[in-house]
Image (cartoon, rainbow, N blue to C red):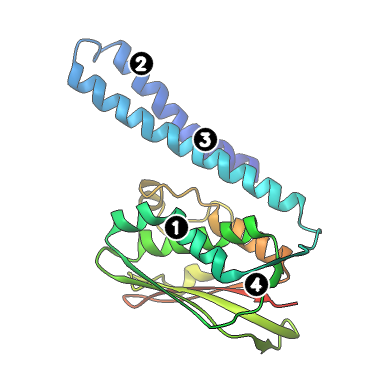
């Protein structure tokens, strides 16, 4: 099933690119405006394939390290600030206001800094893209607190948007590979359908978990729960 899905996801933009090239060589070869339009579309589809290959490689790397516990100590506040810095252009372009409210004196936790940044990048970018222009996205990190499920203290990193929200029947499937709530809109926004699957795998490696709470016309809250030890 996974190979079939990958083949479909790659074949769709590849077929489009081939069609555009044939049109440029044929019917549109003397139409400069049409050629430029098709070249822009080809670039968009090529970038989509590039994102998909990048996410597939990222997923492969995460799975390869699944049984290796991270052993470096990471400052979550600094990682979130780094994610916000790398997404500055996306945030400014979206018209969304992002606020970050970390708790004071958070302890360093064991983790893989690059993988944690990947988690936060995905959480923040999704909230910005689907939260709605002119609205707010709030990022918070709680003080360490006991978690009965993980039997120890955890930090909870929350990203809350105020967009259209997600219907309840979609929530259990959001971390499935290639699962999309709105396939057309997701592809238009550059989504590959692998982001939350990667997030789930990374959190599993860190002995954490992902929580998603959403209500239609209210918004969506995505929470990364991370052990402090």
Q: Residue at x 52, y 66 (%)?
A: 80
Label 2, secondary structure: give it: helix
How packed mark 3 is, by other alpha carbons closer than 10 Å (few <14, some 14-19, many 20 or more), is some
* Residue picked out by circle 3: 10
Q: Secondary structure at mark 1?
A: helix
Vertically, is 153 above or below 28?
A: below
Count of marks overlaid on the render? 4
Mark sitting earlier along the chain (4/1): 1
Which residue lies under the disc numbered 4?
A: 209
Q: Residues within 10 Å of mark 2 (few under 14, many from 20)?
A: few
Q: Residue at x 69, y 52 (%)?
A: 62
Q: Nearer the viewer, residue 157 or 110?
A: 110
Within the image, what quadrant is residue 26 found in? Answer: top left
- The alpha-carbon separation of the residues under discs 2 and 1 comes to 41 Å
Q: Which mark is residue 22?
A: 2
Which of discs 4 and 3 lies nearer the camera? The answer is: 4
State how far apart marks 2 and 4 are (Cα): 47 Å
Q: Are marks 4 and 1 in contact (CB under 8 Å)?
A: no
Tell which circle, 4 or 3, labels the residue nearer the N-terminal end. 3
Q: Which residue is mark 1?
A: 85
Which one is in front in this view, the residue at disc 2 or the one at disc 1? 1
Distance (Cα) linking label 4 and label 3: 30 Å
Residue at the spot x=46%, y=29% of the render? 14
Front label number (4 vs 1):
1
Please provide percent x and percent y for residue 54: 57, 41
Which residue lies most toward the front here? 105
Query: 167 or 34, which lies in front?
Result: 34
- Who comes first in sequence, dot 2 or dot 4? 2
How many residues crowd around disc 4 within 10 Å: few (fewer than 14), some, or many (20 or more)? many
Mark 4 touches mark 3? (CB < 8 Å): no
Q: From mark 2 to mark 3, how far is it between C-alphas?
A: 19 Å
* Image position, residue 171 (x, y; %): 51, 70
């Amino acid at each position: 099933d996974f190979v079939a899905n990958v083949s479909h996801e790659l074949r769709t933009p590849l077929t489009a690119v081939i069609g555009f090239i044939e049109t440029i060589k044929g019917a549109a070869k003397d139409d400069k405006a049409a050629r430029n339009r098709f070249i822009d579309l080809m670039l968009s589809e090529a970038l989509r394939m590039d994102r998909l290959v990048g996410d597939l490689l990222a997923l492969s790397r995460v799975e390869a390290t699944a049984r290796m516990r991270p052993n470096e100590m990471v400052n979550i506040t600094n990682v979130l600030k780094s994610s916000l810095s790398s997404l500055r252009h996306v945030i400014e372009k979206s018209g969304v206001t992002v606020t970050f409210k970390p708790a004071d004196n958070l302890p360093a936790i064991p983790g893989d800094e690059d993988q944690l940044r990947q988690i936060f990048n995905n959480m923040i970018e999704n909230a910005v893209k689907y939260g709605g222009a002119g609205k707010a996205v709030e990022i918070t990190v709680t003080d360490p607190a006991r978690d009965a499920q993980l039997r120890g203290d955890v930090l909870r990193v929350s990203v809350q948007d105020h967009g259209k929200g997600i219907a309840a029947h979609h929530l259990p499937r959001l971390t499935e590979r290639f699962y999309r709530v709105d396939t057309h809109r997701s592809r238009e926004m550059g989504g590959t359908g692998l982001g939350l699957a990667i997030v789930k795998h990374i959190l599993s490696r860190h002995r954490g978990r992902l929580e998603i709470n959403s209500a239609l016309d209210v918004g969506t809250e995505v929470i990364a729960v991370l052990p402090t030890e």
